[in-house]
Amino acid sequence: MEETNIILPDQIKCICTQCDLKKLFFGNVGNLEMQLICDQKIFRKYSKSQIIIHEGDEIQEFTYLKSGLVKLYRTSGDKEQIIHIAKPFDFVSILSIFSNSKYQYSVSALKDTVTCNLKMDDIHKMILKNGTFASDLMRRMSEVSDRIILEMLEVRKRNLKGRVAFILLYFADEIFNSMSFDLPVSRKEIAEWISMSTENVIRSLSEFRQDKVIKIFGKSIEIVNREDLEMISRLG
Amino acid sequence: MEETNIILPDQIKCICTQCDLKKLFFGNVGNLEMQLICDQKIFRKYSKSQIIIHEGDEIQEFTYLKSGLVKLYRTSGDKEQIIHIAKPFDFVSILSIFSNSKYQYSVSALKDTVTCNLKMDDIHKMILKNGTFASDLMRRMSEVSDRIILEMLEVRKRNLKGRVAFILLYFADEIFNSMSFDLPVSRKEIAEWISMSTENVIRSLSEFRQDKVIKIFGKSIEIVNREDLEMISRLG
DNA sequence: CGCGGCTTTGATGTTCATCAAGTAAAGTGG
DNA sequence: CCACTTTACTTGATGAACATCAAAGCCGCG
Protein backbone atom coordinates (compact mmCIF):
# COMPACT_ATOMS: atom_id res chain seq x y z
CA MET A 1 0.00 0.00 0.00
CA GLU A 2 2.99 2.31 0.31
CA GLU A 3 3.18 5.13 -2.18
CA THR A 4 6.42 3.69 -3.51
CA ASN A 5 4.49 0.79 -4.99
CA ILE A 6 2.41 2.96 -7.26
CA ILE A 7 3.26 2.98 -10.93
CA LEU A 8 1.48 5.25 -13.32
CA PRO A 9 -0.77 3.67 -15.96
CA ASP A 10 1.36 4.95 -18.80
CA GLN A 11 4.36 3.12 -17.41
CA ILE A 12 2.62 -0.07 -18.38
CA LYS A 13 1.08 -0.19 -21.80
CA CYS A 14 -2.47 -0.91 -20.75
CA ILE A 15 -5.78 0.02 -22.18
CA CYS A 16 -8.57 -1.35 -20.03
CA THR A 17 -10.79 -2.25 -22.94
CA GLN A 18 -8.06 -4.51 -24.27
CA CYS A 19 -7.05 -5.96 -20.91
CA ASP A 20 -7.11 -9.76 -20.69
CA LEU A 21 -8.72 -9.42 -17.33
CA LYS A 22 -11.57 -7.27 -18.57
CA LYS A 23 -13.84 -10.20 -19.22
CA LEU A 24 -13.35 -11.44 -15.68
CA PHE A 25 -15.44 -8.72 -14.16
CA PHE A 26 -16.14 -6.16 -16.78
CA GLY A 27 -17.39 -8.25 -19.65
CA ASN A 28 -20.75 -6.58 -19.39
CA VAL A 29 -19.69 -3.05 -18.64
CA GLY A 30 -20.16 -0.47 -21.38
CA ASN A 31 -17.26 1.49 -22.78
CA LEU A 32 -18.38 4.70 -21.18
CA GLU A 33 -18.57 3.22 -17.68
CA MET A 34 -15.33 1.38 -18.35
CA GLN A 35 -13.61 4.64 -19.16
CA LEU A 36 -14.54 6.09 -15.78
CA ILE A 37 -13.07 3.12 -13.97
CA CYS A 38 -10.08 3.07 -16.24
CA ASP A 39 -9.19 6.68 -15.52
CA GLN A 40 -9.18 6.01 -11.80
CA LYS A 41 -7.13 2.85 -11.78
CA ILE A 42 -3.76 2.58 -10.10
CA PHE A 43 -1.16 -0.08 -10.68
CA ARG A 44 1.00 -1.23 -7.83
CA LYS A 45 4.13 -3.25 -8.20
CA TYR A 46 5.44 -5.62 -5.57
CA SER A 47 8.63 -7.60 -5.44
CA LYS A 48 8.92 -11.07 -3.98
CA SER A 49 7.85 -11.32 -0.32
CA GLN A 50 6.39 -7.81 -0.16
CA ILE A 51 3.03 -7.57 1.53
CA ILE A 52 0.18 -6.55 -0.74
CA ILE A 53 -2.67 -6.70 1.73
CA HIS A 54 -2.28 -6.70 5.46
CA GLU A 55 -4.81 -8.43 7.71
CA GLY A 56 -6.68 -5.77 9.65
CA ASP A 57 -6.16 -2.98 7.11
CA GLU A 58 -9.08 -0.87 6.04
CA ILE A 59 -10.52 -2.01 2.71
CA GLN A 60 -10.58 0.92 0.34
CA GLU A 61 -9.57 -0.59 -2.95
CA PHE A 62 -10.73 -3.35 -5.20
CA THR A 63 -7.49 -5.19 -5.94
CA TYR A 64 -6.79 -7.81 -8.54
CA LEU A 65 -3.69 -9.43 -9.96
CA LYS A 66 -2.44 -8.37 -13.35
CA SER A 67 0.63 -10.58 -13.17
CA GLY A 68 2.62 -12.52 -10.63
CA LEU A 69 1.81 -15.00 -7.91
CA VAL A 70 0.63 -14.43 -4.36
CA LYS A 71 -0.14 -16.29 -1.16
CA LEU A 72 -3.22 -15.67 0.92
CA TYR A 73 -2.55 -16.31 4.59
CA ARG A 74 -3.46 -15.56 8.13
CA THR A 75 -1.17 -14.83 11.05
CA SER A 76 -1.86 -16.04 14.57
CA GLY A 77 0.78 -15.38 17.16
CA ASP A 78 4.11 -15.99 15.48
CA LYS A 79 2.73 -18.63 13.13
CA GLU A 80 1.31 -18.32 9.67
CA GLN A 81 -1.41 -20.40 8.08
CA ILE A 82 -1.43 -20.35 4.30
CA ILE A 83 -4.93 -20.48 2.90
CA HIS A 84 -4.35 -20.40 -0.83
CA ILE A 85 -1.85 -19.64 -3.56
CA ALA A 86 -3.24 -17.60 -6.39
CA LYS A 87 -2.27 -16.43 -9.82
CA PRO A 88 -3.95 -13.83 -12.04
CA PHE A 89 -7.61 -14.67 -12.75
CA ASP A 90 -7.75 -16.24 -9.29
CA PHE A 91 -9.06 -13.14 -7.70
CA VAL A 92 -8.37 -13.81 -4.06
CA SER A 93 -8.69 -10.35 -2.64
CA ILE A 94 -12.36 -10.54 -3.46
CA LEU A 95 -12.93 -12.32 -0.16
CA SER A 96 -14.14 -10.22 2.76
CA ILE A 97 -14.42 -7.04 0.77
CA PHE A 98 -18.18 -6.98 0.68
CA SER A 99 -18.80 -7.93 4.27
CA ASN A 100 -16.03 -6.40 6.29
CA SER A 101 -14.52 -2.98 6.45
CA LYS A 102 -11.18 -4.63 7.22
CA TYR A 103 -9.26 -7.41 5.57
CA GLN A 104 -9.48 -10.75 7.34
CA TYR A 105 -6.43 -12.17 5.56
CA SER A 106 -3.04 -11.04 4.37
CA VAL A 107 -1.73 -11.36 0.84
CA SER A 108 1.93 -11.27 -0.10
CA ALA A 109 3.88 -11.65 -3.33
CA LEU A 110 5.62 -14.95 -4.08
CA LYS A 111 7.21 -13.43 -7.13
CA ASP A 112 7.20 -9.98 -8.71
CA THR A 113 3.57 -9.02 -8.93
CA VAL A 114 1.55 -6.17 -10.39
CA THR A 115 -1.91 -5.39 -9.13
CA CYS A 116 -4.57 -3.22 -10.65
CA ASN A 117 -6.43 -1.24 -8.02
CA LEU A 118 -9.79 0.39 -8.40
CA LYS A 119 -11.67 2.50 -5.90
CA MET A 120 -14.03 0.39 -3.84
CA ASP A 121 -16.59 3.19 -4.00
CA ASP A 122 -16.67 3.01 -7.79
CA ILE A 123 -17.25 -0.71 -7.65
CA HIS A 124 -20.07 -0.27 -5.18
CA LYS A 125 -21.65 2.34 -7.37
CA MET A 126 -21.41 0.11 -10.39
CA ILE A 127 -23.00 -2.79 -8.56
CA LEU A 128 -25.97 -0.58 -7.83
CA LYS A 129 -26.25 0.66 -11.39
CA ASN A 130 -25.29 -2.33 -13.47
CA GLY A 131 -27.04 -5.58 -12.61
CA THR A 132 -25.10 -7.67 -15.05
CA PHE A 133 -21.85 -6.49 -13.52
CA ALA A 134 -23.17 -7.39 -10.08
CA SER A 135 -24.13 -10.81 -11.35
CA ASP A 136 -20.71 -11.44 -12.90
CA LEU A 137 -18.97 -10.33 -9.75
CA MET A 138 -21.10 -12.66 -7.67
CA ARG A 139 -20.19 -15.56 -9.86
CA ARG A 140 -16.51 -14.76 -9.39
CA MET A 141 -16.87 -14.46 -5.62
CA SER A 142 -18.69 -17.74 -5.46
CA GLU A 143 -16.06 -19.46 -7.59
CA VAL A 144 -13.19 -18.20 -5.47
CA SER A 145 -14.67 -19.14 -2.13
CA ASP A 146 -15.82 -22.51 -3.43
CA ARG A 147 -12.37 -23.29 -4.75
CA ILE A 148 -10.68 -22.32 -1.49
CA ILE A 149 -13.05 -24.32 0.68
CA LEU A 150 -12.90 -27.42 -1.53
CA GLU A 151 -9.12 -27.19 -1.64
CA MET A 152 -8.90 -26.98 2.15
CA LEU A 153 -11.09 -30.08 2.38
CA GLU A 154 -8.91 -31.94 -0.11
CA VAL A 155 -5.80 -31.18 1.92
CA ARG A 156 -7.46 -31.96 5.22
CA LYS A 157 -8.58 -35.45 4.27
CA ARG A 158 -5.05 -36.57 3.36
CA ASN A 159 -2.09 -37.65 5.50
CA LEU A 160 1.39 -36.13 5.34
CA LYS A 161 2.62 -37.73 2.13
CA GLY A 162 -0.75 -37.41 0.45
CA ARG A 163 -0.78 -33.71 1.25
CA VAL A 164 2.71 -33.12 -0.08
CA ALA A 165 1.90 -35.05 -3.27
CA PHE A 166 -1.33 -33.08 -3.62
CA ILE A 167 0.55 -29.78 -3.36
CA LEU A 168 3.13 -30.83 -5.96
CA LEU A 169 0.35 -31.78 -8.36
CA TYR A 170 -1.37 -28.51 -7.54
CA PHE A 171 1.69 -26.56 -8.64
CA ALA A 172 2.09 -28.70 -11.74
CA ASP A 173 -1.54 -28.52 -12.83
CA GLU A 174 -2.97 -25.30 -11.47
CA ILE A 175 -0.06 -22.93 -11.34
CA PHE A 176 2.63 -23.90 -13.85
CA ASN A 177 0.93 -26.27 -16.28
CA SER A 178 4.14 -28.23 -16.43
CA MET A 179 5.75 -31.30 -14.90
CA SER A 180 8.86 -29.28 -14.02
CA PHE A 181 8.86 -25.97 -12.23
CA ASP A 182 10.61 -23.89 -9.60
CA LEU A 183 8.87 -23.98 -6.27
CA PRO A 184 7.72 -20.43 -5.53
CA VAL A 185 7.54 -21.24 -1.82
CA SER A 186 9.89 -22.48 0.87
CA ARG A 187 9.54 -25.89 2.51
CA LYS A 188 8.37 -23.99 5.57
CA GLU A 189 5.58 -22.37 3.58
CA ILE A 190 4.43 -25.73 2.23
CA ALA A 191 4.32 -26.87 5.85
CA GLU A 192 2.22 -23.85 6.81
CA TRP A 193 -0.08 -24.61 3.93
CA ILE A 194 -0.73 -28.25 4.78
CA SER A 195 -0.47 -27.94 8.58
CA MET A 196 2.54 -30.20 9.00
CA SER A 197 6.06 -29.62 10.30
CA THR A 198 8.75 -28.34 7.95
CA GLU A 199 10.98 -31.33 8.68
CA ASN A 200 8.28 -33.77 7.66
CA VAL A 201 7.58 -31.91 4.44
CA ILE A 202 11.28 -32.24 3.63
CA ARG A 203 11.31 -35.90 4.60
CA SER A 204 8.38 -36.57 2.27
CA LEU A 205 10.08 -34.79 -0.60
CA SER A 206 13.30 -36.73 0.04
CA GLU A 207 11.37 -39.97 0.07
CA PHE A 208 9.67 -39.13 -3.23
CA ARG A 209 13.10 -38.44 -4.65
CA GLN A 210 14.53 -41.71 -3.36
CA ASP A 211 11.57 -43.54 -4.87
CA LYS A 212 12.26 -41.77 -8.16
CA VAL A 213 8.85 -40.13 -8.21
CA ILE A 214 10.34 -36.64 -8.45
CA LYS A 215 13.72 -34.99 -9.01
CA ILE A 216 14.84 -32.15 -6.78
CA PHE A 217 17.51 -29.52 -7.31
CA GLY A 218 16.99 -26.95 -4.60
CA LYS A 219 13.77 -25.14 -5.44
CA SER A 220 13.52 -26.86 -8.79
CA ILE A 221 11.14 -29.81 -8.99
CA GLU A 222 10.54 -32.27 -11.76
CA ILE A 223 7.74 -34.79 -11.58
CA VAL A 224 9.18 -37.97 -13.08
CA ASN A 225 6.46 -40.47 -12.33
CA ARG A 226 3.14 -38.73 -12.34
CA GLU A 227 1.07 -41.89 -11.88
CA ASP A 228 2.85 -42.74 -8.64
CA LEU A 229 2.52 -39.21 -7.35
CA GLU A 230 -1.19 -39.26 -8.11
CA MET A 231 -1.49 -42.60 -6.35
CA ILE A 232 0.21 -41.18 -3.25
CA SER A 233 -2.10 -38.17 -3.37
CA ARG A 234 -5.19 -40.34 -3.78
CA LEU A 235 -4.38 -42.91 -1.14
CA GLY A 236 -2.68 -40.67 1.41
CA MET B 1 -36.33 -32.09 -2.45
CA GLU B 2 -39.02 -34.77 -2.49
CA GLU B 3 -42.55 -33.56 -3.04
CA THR B 4 -43.48 -34.92 0.36
CA ASN B 5 -41.40 -32.22 1.97
CA ILE B 6 -43.44 -29.41 0.52
CA ILE B 7 -45.79 -27.59 2.81
CA LEU B 8 -48.10 -24.94 1.54
CA PRO B 9 -47.50 -21.37 2.68
CA ASP B 10 -50.82 -21.17 4.44
CA GLN B 11 -49.88 -24.12 6.61
CA ILE B 12 -47.37 -21.85 8.26
CA LYS B 13 -48.57 -18.41 9.19
CA CYS B 14 -46.11 -16.43 7.19
CA ILE B 15 -46.29 -13.13 5.43
CA CYS B 16 -43.04 -12.33 3.71
CA THR B 17 -43.11 -8.65 4.53
CA GLN B 18 -43.22 -9.55 8.21
CA CYS B 19 -40.71 -12.36 8.06
CA ASP B 20 -37.78 -12.06 10.45
CA LEU B 21 -35.52 -13.12 7.66
CA LYS B 22 -36.69 -10.44 5.26
CA LYS B 23 -34.01 -7.98 6.25
CA LEU B 24 -31.32 -10.57 5.57
CA PHE B 25 -31.72 -10.38 1.84
CA PHE B 26 -34.77 -8.36 1.06
CA GLY B 27 -34.31 -5.30 3.22
CA ASN B 28 -34.11 -3.20 0.11
CA VAL B 29 -36.74 -4.84 -2.01
CA GLY B 30 -39.95 -2.95 -2.59
CA ASN B 31 -43.32 -4.36 -1.59
CA LEU B 32 -44.37 -4.98 -5.15
CA GLU B 33 -41.29 -7.02 -6.02
CA MET B 34 -41.54 -8.74 -2.67
CA GLN B 35 -45.05 -9.83 -3.47
CA LEU B 36 -43.91 -11.57 -6.65
CA ILE B 37 -41.28 -13.52 -4.76
CA CYS B 38 -43.64 -14.21 -1.94
CA ASP B 39 -46.27 -15.74 -4.19
CA GLN B 40 -43.73 -18.15 -5.63
CA LYS B 41 -42.17 -19.33 -2.42
CA ILE B 42 -42.35 -22.91 -1.22
CA PHE B 43 -41.70 -24.16 2.28
CA ARG B 44 -40.11 -27.53 2.81
CA LYS B 45 -40.03 -29.38 6.07
CA TYR B 46 -37.32 -31.85 7.03
CA SER B 47 -37.00 -34.07 10.04
CA LYS B 48 -33.74 -34.89 11.77
CA SER B 49 -31.14 -36.47 9.49
CA GLN B 50 -33.08 -35.89 6.28
CA ILE B 51 -31.04 -34.56 3.40
CA ILE B 52 -31.97 -31.05 2.29
CA ILE B 53 -29.39 -30.57 -0.43
CA HIS B 54 -27.48 -33.34 -2.10
CA GLU B 55 -23.99 -32.77 -3.50
CA GLY B 56 -24.19 -32.95 -7.28
CA ASP B 57 -27.84 -31.96 -7.54
CA GLU B 58 -28.87 -29.32 -10.03
CA ILE B 59 -29.30 -25.92 -8.39
CA GLN B 60 -32.75 -24.61 -9.16
CA GLU B 61 -33.82 -23.03 -5.94
CA PHE B 62 -32.59 -20.39 -3.60
CA THR B 63 -32.86 -22.09 -0.23
CA TYR B 64 -32.64 -20.59 3.21
CA LEU B 65 -33.41 -21.75 6.71
CA LYS B 66 -36.53 -20.54 8.42
CA SER B 67 -35.98 -22.68 11.48
CA GLY B 68 -33.91 -25.62 12.61
CA LEU B 69 -30.25 -26.56 12.42
CA VAL B 70 -28.26 -28.11 9.59
CA LYS B 71 -24.85 -29.46 8.79
CA LEU B 72 -22.98 -28.64 5.62
CA TYR B 73 -20.73 -31.50 4.56
CA ARG B 74 -19.00 -33.26 1.75
CA THR B 75 -18.81 -36.98 1.08
CA SER B 76 -15.72 -38.65 -0.31
CA GLY B 77 -15.80 -42.39 -0.58
CA ASP B 78 -17.52 -43.68 2.52
CA LYS B 79 -16.34 -40.81 4.69
CA GLU B 80 -17.94 -37.49 5.45
CA GLN B 81 -16.23 -34.20 6.14
CA ILE B 82 -18.34 -31.68 8.00
CA ILE B 83 -17.68 -28.14 6.86
CA HIS B 84 -19.99 -26.11 9.01
CA ILE B 85 -23.02 -26.23 11.27
CA ALA B 86 -25.55 -23.55 10.57
CA LYS B 87 -28.69 -22.11 12.06
CA PRO B 88 -31.19 -19.67 10.54
CA PHE B 89 -29.56 -16.41 9.44
CA ASP B 90 -26.43 -18.42 8.62
CA PHE B 91 -27.34 -18.82 5.03
CA VAL B 92 -25.10 -21.71 4.02
CA SER B 93 -26.77 -22.78 0.85
CA ILE B 94 -25.68 -19.50 -0.64
CA LEU B 95 -22.32 -21.09 -1.42
CA SER B 96 -21.81 -22.37 -4.97
CA ILE B 97 -25.15 -21.18 -6.24
CA PHE B 98 -23.80 -18.35 -8.31
CA SER B 99 -20.86 -20.17 -9.83
CA ASN B 100 -21.95 -23.73 -10.33
CA SER B 101 -24.98 -25.35 -11.84
CA LYS B 102 -24.64 -28.14 -9.29
CA TYR B 103 -24.23 -28.16 -5.54
CA GLN B 104 -20.69 -28.79 -4.34
CA TYR B 105 -21.79 -29.71 -0.82
CA SER B 106 -24.58 -31.56 0.90
CA VAL B 107 -26.79 -30.15 3.63
CA SER B 108 -28.78 -32.25 6.06
CA ALA B 109 -31.03 -31.50 9.02
CA LEU B 110 -29.66 -31.93 12.56
CA LYS B 111 -33.09 -31.24 13.97
CA ASP B 112 -36.48 -30.58 12.47
CA THR B 113 -35.94 -27.84 9.95
CA VAL B 114 -38.07 -25.69 7.68
CA THR B 115 -36.62 -24.06 4.60
CA CYS B 116 -38.05 -21.31 2.46
CA ASN B 117 -37.35 -21.90 -1.21
CA LEU B 118 -37.47 -19.35 -3.97
CA LYS B 119 -36.94 -19.86 -7.65
CA MET B 120 -33.31 -19.25 -8.61
CA ASP B 121 -34.49 -17.54 -11.80
CA ASP B 122 -36.43 -14.96 -9.83
CA ILE B 123 -33.35 -14.21 -7.73
CA HIS B 124 -31.24 -13.81 -10.86
CA LYS B 125 -33.78 -11.47 -12.35
CA MET B 126 -33.89 -9.41 -9.21
CA ILE B 127 -30.11 -9.11 -9.09
CA LEU B 128 -30.20 -7.63 -12.58
CA LYS B 129 -32.98 -5.22 -11.76
CA ASN B 130 -32.28 -4.22 -8.19
CA GLY B 131 -28.71 -3.13 -7.44
CA THR B 132 -29.29 -2.72 -3.74
CA PHE B 133 -30.56 -6.25 -3.51
CA ALA B 134 -27.47 -7.47 -5.37
CA SER B 135 -25.28 -5.54 -3.00
CA ASP B 136 -27.01 -6.96 0.08
CA LEU B 137 -26.75 -10.47 -1.27
CA MET B 138 -23.06 -10.01 -1.93
CA ARG B 139 -22.47 -8.92 1.60
CA ARG B 140 -24.23 -12.04 2.86
CA MET B 141 -22.23 -14.31 0.56
CA SER B 142 -19.01 -12.72 1.64
CA GLU B 143 -19.93 -13.04 5.32
CA VAL B 144 -20.81 -16.71 5.01
CA SER B 145 -17.70 -17.75 3.12
CA ASP B 146 -15.48 -15.66 5.39
CA ARG B 147 -16.96 -17.24 8.47
CA ILE B 148 -16.54 -20.76 7.13
CA ILE B 149 -12.94 -20.21 6.05
CA LEU B 150 -11.93 -18.53 9.30
CA GLU B 151 -13.60 -21.29 11.29
CA MET B 152 -11.77 -23.98 9.36
CA LEU B 153 -8.49 -22.17 10.08
CA GLU B 154 -9.31 -21.94 13.77
CA VAL B 155 -9.96 -25.67 13.95
CA ARG B 156 -6.92 -26.54 11.88
CA LYS B 157 -4.42 -24.70 14.06
CA ARG B 158 -5.43 -26.59 17.19
CA ASN B 159 -4.60 -30.08 18.45
CA LEU B 160 -7.15 -32.73 19.45
CA LYS B 161 -8.20 -31.33 22.82
CA GLY B 162 -8.06 -27.76 21.58
CA ARG B 163 -10.37 -28.66 18.74
CA VAL B 164 -12.88 -30.43 20.96
CA ALA B 165 -12.87 -27.50 23.39
CA PHE B 166 -13.32 -25.10 20.49
CA ILE B 167 -16.32 -27.02 19.20
CA LEU B 168 -17.94 -27.10 22.63
CA LEU B 169 -17.50 -23.34 22.94
CA TYR B 170 -18.83 -22.98 19.41
CA PHE B 171 -22.04 -24.73 20.37
CA ALA B 172 -22.32 -22.73 23.57
CA ASP B 173 -21.66 -19.35 21.98
CA GLU B 174 -22.76 -19.54 18.38
CA ILE B 175 -25.58 -22.05 18.37
CA PHE B 176 -27.24 -22.26 21.77
CA ASN B 177 -26.18 -19.14 23.62
CA SER B 178 -26.02 -21.20 26.77
CA MET B 179 -23.54 -23.05 28.92
CA SER B 180 -25.72 -26.15 28.86
CA PHE B 181 -27.20 -27.71 25.77
CA ASP B 182 -28.00 -30.98 24.04
CA LEU B 183 -25.41 -31.88 21.43
CA PRO B 184 -27.20 -31.92 18.07
CA VAL B 185 -24.49 -34.16 16.65
CA SER B 186 -22.98 -37.54 17.44
CA ARG B 187 -19.39 -37.99 18.64
CA LYS B 188 -18.69 -39.36 15.20
CA GLU B 189 -19.93 -36.16 13.59
CA ILE B 190 -17.75 -34.04 15.84
CA ALA B 191 -14.86 -36.24 14.71
CA GLU B 192 -15.77 -35.66 11.06
CA TRP B 193 -15.91 -31.97 11.74
CA ILE B 194 -12.49 -31.65 13.37
CA SER B 195 -10.74 -34.39 11.39
CA MET B 196 -9.96 -36.65 14.34
CA SER B 197 -11.04 -40.16 15.25
CA THR B 198 -14.31 -40.76 17.08
CA GLU B 199 -12.52 -42.54 19.92
CA ASN B 200 -10.25 -39.60 20.55
CA VAL B 201 -13.14 -37.16 20.57
CA ILE B 202 -14.76 -39.32 23.23
CA ARG B 203 -11.52 -39.56 25.20
CA SER B 204 -11.20 -35.77 25.18
CA LEU B 205 -14.75 -35.34 26.39
CA SER B 206 -14.18 -37.93 29.13
CA GLU B 207 -11.03 -36.16 30.20
CA PHE B 208 -12.81 -32.81 30.37
CA ARG B 209 -15.43 -34.49 32.53
CA GLN B 210 -12.83 -36.04 34.82
CA ASP B 211 -11.16 -32.65 35.16
CA LYS B 212 -14.55 -31.17 36.03
CA VAL B 213 -14.50 -28.78 33.08
CA ILE B 214 -17.79 -30.12 31.74
CA LYS B 215 -20.61 -32.42 32.80
CA ILE B 216 -21.92 -35.06 30.41
CA PHE B 217 -25.20 -36.97 30.41
CA GLY B 218 -25.39 -38.66 27.05
CA LYS B 219 -25.97 -35.93 24.52
CA SER B 220 -26.44 -33.35 27.21
CA ILE B 221 -23.44 -31.12 27.93
CA GLU B 222 -22.91 -28.57 30.64
CA ILE B 223 -19.87 -26.33 30.65
CA VAL B 224 -18.90 -26.06 34.30
CA ASN B 225 -15.58 -24.27 34.07
CA ARG B 226 -15.61 -22.01 31.08
CA GLU B 227 -12.24 -20.44 31.81
CA ASP B 228 -10.49 -23.80 31.73
CA LEU B 229 -12.27 -24.80 28.54
CA GLU B 230 -11.22 -21.54 26.91
CA MET B 231 -7.68 -22.14 28.06
CA ILE B 232 -7.68 -25.60 26.49
CA SER B 233 -9.09 -24.14 23.29
CA ARG B 234 -6.52 -21.35 23.23
CA LEU B 235 -3.48 -23.43 24.04
CA GLY B 236 -4.42 -26.59 22.18
C1' DC C 1 33.22 -12.75 5.55
C1' DG C 2 30.07 -13.66 8.90
C1' DC C 3 25.30 -13.88 10.17
C1' DG C 4 20.74 -15.55 9.90
C1' DG C 5 17.49 -18.15 7.61
C1' DC C 6 16.68 -22.29 4.84
C1' DT C 7 17.49 -27.19 4.13
C1' DT C 8 18.58 -31.77 5.47
C1' DT C 9 19.05 -36.00 8.35
C1' DG C 10 18.91 -38.56 12.60
C1' DA C 11 17.22 -39.55 17.26
C1' DT C 12 13.63 -39.28 20.47
C1' DG C 13 9.16 -38.60 22.39
C1' DT C 14 4.27 -37.23 21.90
C1' DT C 15 0.05 -37.38 19.73
C1' DC C 16 -3.08 -39.68 17.51
C1' DA C 17 -5.32 -43.78 14.80
C1' DT C 18 -6.51 -48.32 14.95
C1' DC C 19 -7.96 -52.59 16.86
C1' DA C 20 -10.56 -54.99 20.21
C1' DA C 21 -14.21 -55.78 23.34
C1' DG C 22 -17.92 -54.51 25.91
C1' DT C 23 -22.08 -51.67 27.25
C1' DA C 24 -25.78 -48.74 26.18
C1' DA C 25 -29.16 -46.83 23.14
C1' DA C 26 -31.90 -46.63 19.17
C1' DG C 27 -34.19 -48.34 15.32
C1' DT C 28 -36.73 -52.62 12.94
C1' DG C 29 -39.73 -56.28 11.89
C1' DG C 30 -42.77 -59.82 13.60
C1' DC D 1 -44.51 -54.69 22.59
C1' DC D 2 -40.66 -57.66 22.51
C1' DA D 3 -36.73 -59.85 20.41
C1' DC D 4 -33.46 -58.58 17.23
C1' DT D 5 -30.24 -55.91 14.78
C1' DT D 6 -27.77 -52.18 14.17
C1' DT D 7 -25.66 -47.99 15.53
C1' DA D 8 -23.61 -45.11 19.08
C1' DC D 9 -20.68 -44.82 22.94
C1' DT D 10 -16.81 -46.01 26.00
C1' DT D 11 -12.24 -47.71 27.66
C1' DG D 12 -7.87 -50.01 27.18
C1' DA D 13 -3.88 -51.63 24.64
C1' DT D 14 -0.87 -51.22 20.79
C1' DG D 15 1.51 -49.30 17.00
C1' DA D 16 1.88 -45.75 13.42
C1' DA D 17 2.21 -41.06 12.21
C1' DC D 18 3.92 -36.97 13.25
C1' DA D 19 6.35 -33.12 16.11
C1' DT D 20 10.24 -31.70 18.31
C1' DC D 21 15.01 -31.35 19.35
C1' DA D 22 19.67 -31.35 17.84
C1' DA D 23 23.47 -30.77 14.70
C1' DA D 24 25.49 -29.74 10.48
C1' DG D 25 25.84 -27.97 5.68
C1' DC D 26 24.23 -24.58 2.53
C1' DC D 27 22.89 -20.27 0.53
C1' DG D 28 22.06 -15.42 0.08
C1' DC D 29 22.82 -10.94 1.65
C1' DG D 30 24.54 -6.92 3.93
Image (tube, coloured by chain):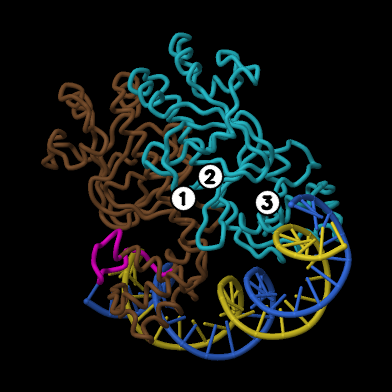
Chain colours: A cyan, B brown, C yellow, D blue
Residue, x 77% and y 38% (percent of image)?
Answer: A178
Q: Which three-letter amino acid code belongs to the residue tagged 1?
A: Ile
Q: Are marks 2 and 1 in contact (CB under 8 Å)?
A: yes
Percent coordinates x, y for residue B66 in the rendering: 23, 45
Q: Amino acid at mark 3?
A: Phe
In the image: residue B98, left or right of residue A73:
left
Residue A166 is labelled as: 3
- Residue B114 forms part of the magenta stretch: no
Q: Amino acid at mark 2?
A: Ile
Residue A52 at x, y percent in the picture? 56, 40
Q: Residues within 10 Å of mark 3 (few under 14, many from 20)?
A: many
Give the SS element for disc 3: helix
**Left or right of B68: which side holds D11?**
right
The residues colored magenta run: B172-187
Tag 3 or tag 2, which sits nearer the N-term?
2
Q: Residue at x 48, y 48 (%)?
A: A55
The disc label shown at residue B149, or none = 1
- Residue A144 lies left or right of residue A227; in this view the side is left
Label 2: chain letter: A
Residue drawn at point x = 16 percent, y = 39 percent: B19
